[in-house]
């Protein structure tokens, strides 16, 4: 068996909350969490030309690798654990959640910008901007007078443009934080993740950092958007601009979605790194699988990651496990069916009324247009989601 492909693997330590040492296997810009035994095995095999040489070397080795010095077992481990990485099996599984993905700004064009912006993560500068920005936001929330919205194309376009720029600045925050810690970033792009339109910055190399630095990178996007709000708030108070007012509130509302710890937005990755549990959602699923096979099917199976955690993190992970399943149960078993029933019952009449009230001399109000469009897109996405879910359940092609 040819094992020269193992020479292209890079193994480094990986900080998690596990009681056992964890390592990171890097191959072709992809990262895999592995245990100490497999990490030691890979490091030993990197100096070998073939399986026979590897087997002889492991037999002489007194480390944990002596447990797998049997040639047949060694061959089985390579075939089941390492060759699938080369064959791209894991990558296909990982990318299946993306319905569409495209790059907007390449890393080569992005690097000169992030090199200039990374100074924002100097601790003194960070404290100054985060405190001044938060004070400005609080002042705006409590003292800004509600602006009257001018419903015209110019206003809609400008609010949309400001929001779009804030999102790009958000992604620059993740990339700049990565550069501050001397980790190269990838591209900024746009994707459809599950059924959500999202922008992203490729900072996958941040897995090589410790948890505290990963958390800073996770927070980098929100931090940059908070900075983005500073001149916008100032402009509002100087000019009493209704466009600035509604743009500010649109960005503030987006923080609620970004910081949600259950969907895979910023809040999810922040929670994952605070708990020290990579692939947090997948690890919660392991618990169901483990107890189902252990208690119902009476099968021996690998212990879930939860049981490997340190006691403090184990408590908080279990708390997250309960909350996340209650959240998804509430969303998928109650809110979505209720929303769809209401949508199918009332939306056609609302749309007809909206069209009848529309005339060439006036524009509908901001809230009216926002409501009719958001209901439409959410309704269509949920119908599409239910359609795909039913297809998987009944396992037929329609």
Image (cartoon, rainbow, N blue to C red):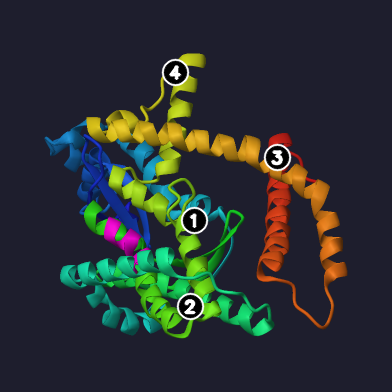
User: Residue 8 placed where, x, y %?
Assistant: 31, 60
Look at the image and tell me whether residue 46 can be seen: no
Q: Earlier in the sequence, mark 2 or mark 4?
A: 2
Return the residue at label 3. 337
- SS at mark 1 in the image: helix
Q: CA distance from mark 2 to mark 4?
A: 51 Å
Above/below status of 319 relative to 378:
above
- Tell me the chief SS of the magenta region: helix
User: Residue 230 placed where, x, y %?
Assistant: 36, 76
* Badge nearest the viewer, 1 or 4: 1
Residue for point 31% across, 37% down: 74
330 lies left or right of 187: right
- SS at mark 3 in the image: helix
Q: Earlier in the sequence, mark 1 or mark 3?
A: 1
Return the residue at label 2. 165
Q: How many residues crowd mark 1 within 10 Å: few (<14), some (14–19), many (20+)?
A: some
Q: Which residues are magenta?
A: 215-223
Return the residue at label 1. 257
């Amino acid at each position: 068996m040819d094992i020269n492909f193992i020479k292209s693997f890079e193994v480094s330590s990986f900080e998690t909350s596990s009681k056992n040492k964890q390592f990171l296997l890097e191959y072709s810009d992809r990262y895999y969490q592995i245990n100490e035994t497999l990490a030691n095995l890979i490091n030993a095999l990197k100096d070998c030309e073939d399986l026979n040489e590897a087997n002889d070397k492991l037999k002489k080795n007194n480390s944990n690798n002596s447990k797998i010095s049997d040639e047949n077992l060694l061959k089985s481990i390579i075939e089941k654990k390492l060759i699938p990485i080369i064959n791209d099996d894991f990558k296909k599984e990982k990318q299946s959640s993306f319905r569409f993905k495209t790059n907007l700004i390449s890393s080569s064009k992005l690097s000169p910008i992030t090199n200039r912006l990374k100074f924002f993560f100097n601790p003194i500068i960070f404290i100054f901007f985060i405190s001044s920005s938060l004070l400005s936001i609080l002042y705006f929330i409590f003292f800004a007078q509600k602006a009257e919205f001018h419903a015209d194309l110019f206003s809609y376009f400008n609010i949309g443009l400001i929001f779009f720029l804030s999102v790009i600045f958000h992604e620059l925050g993740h990339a700049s934080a990565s550069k501050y810690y001397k980790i190269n970033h990838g591209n900024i792009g746009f994707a459809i993740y599950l059924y959500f339109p999202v922008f992203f910055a490729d900072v996958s190399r941040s897995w090589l950092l410790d948890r505290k630095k990963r958390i800073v990178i996770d927070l980098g996007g929100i931090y940059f958007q908070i900075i983005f709000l500073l001149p916008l708030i100032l402009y509002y108070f100087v000019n009493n601009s209704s466009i600035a007012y509604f743009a500010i509130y649109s960005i503030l509302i987006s923080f609620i979605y970004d910081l949600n710890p259950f969907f895979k937005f910023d809040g999810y990755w922040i929670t994952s790194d605070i708990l020290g549990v990579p692939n947090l959602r997948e690890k919660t699923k392991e618990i169901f699988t483990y107890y189902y096979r252990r208690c119902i099917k009476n099968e021996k199976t690998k212990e879930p990651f939860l049981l490997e955690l340190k006691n403090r993190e184990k408590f908080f992970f279990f708390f997250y496990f309960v909350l996340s399943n209650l959240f998804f149960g509430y969303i998928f078993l109650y809110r979505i069916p209720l929303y769809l029933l209401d949508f199918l019952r009332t939306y056609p009449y609302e749309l007809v009324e909206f069209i009848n009230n529309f005339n060439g001399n006036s524009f509908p109000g901001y809230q009216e247009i926002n409501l009719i469009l958001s209901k439409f897109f959410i309704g269509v996405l949920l119908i599409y989601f239910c359609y795909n879910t039913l297809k998987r359940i009944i396992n037929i092609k329609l």
